[in-house]
């Protein structure tokens, strides 16, 4: 059985969500304040390129983003007043995705 795809936004997943190879991590994620924070398992390192391509194909604009905690994101995108920050965790085996 395939893992359930996490839905980061209350209104349902953004249009690019199913284009991205996302796998829920064992400790998954949850809502943190007004943000939605997810940890996803990262298969081989080149998969990061799939994330970037998917955001760009779907009209998200890249920007140099910094998380609320002050740590820099691996990459960040914005579209229609929404922001997403993606950064590595656990030596790169997980990716943290924060929707704000």
Image (spheres, rainbow, N blue to C red):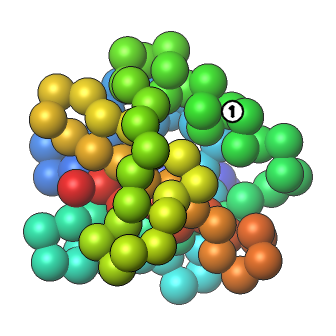
Instruction: Answer whether residue 21 is visible to the viewer in this image.
Output: yes
Which residue is located at x 12 percent, y 68 percent? 34
Q: Quadrant of residue 41?
A: bottom right
Residue 54 relative to residue 90: left or right: left
Q: Nearer the viewer, residue 45 or 70?
A: 70
Query: Does residue 53 sit above or below 63 in this rendering?
Result: above
The crowd level at tag 1 (other Cα within 10 Å; few <14, some 14-19, many 20+) is few
Q: Position of residue 24 (x, y in %)?
A: 56, 65
Query: Does residue 32 sit above or below 87 in this rendering?
Result: below
Which residue is located at x 22 percent, y 55 percent? 100
Q: Position of residue 13 (x, y in %)?
A: 31, 40
Q: Which residue is mark 1?
A: 50
Which residue is located at x 21 percent, y 66 percent? 35
Q: Position of residue 46 (x, y in %)?
A: 84, 42
Q: Nearer the viewer, residue 62 or 11?
A: 62
Residue 70 relative to residue 92: left or right: left
Q: Quadrant of the N terminus?
A: bottom right
């Amino acid at each position: 059985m395939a893992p359930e795809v996490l839905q980061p936004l209350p209104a349902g997943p953004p249009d690019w969500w199913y284009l991205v190879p996302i796998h829920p991590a064992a400790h998954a994620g949850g809502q943190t304040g007004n943000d939605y924070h997810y940890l996803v398992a990262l298969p081989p390192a080149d998969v990061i390129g799939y994330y970037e391509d998917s955001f760009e194909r779907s009209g998200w604009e890249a920007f140099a983003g910094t998380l609320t905690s002050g740590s820099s994101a691996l990459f960040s995108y914005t579209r229609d007043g929404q922001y997403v920050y993606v950064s590595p965790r656990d030596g790169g085996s997980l990716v943290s995705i924060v929707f704000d």
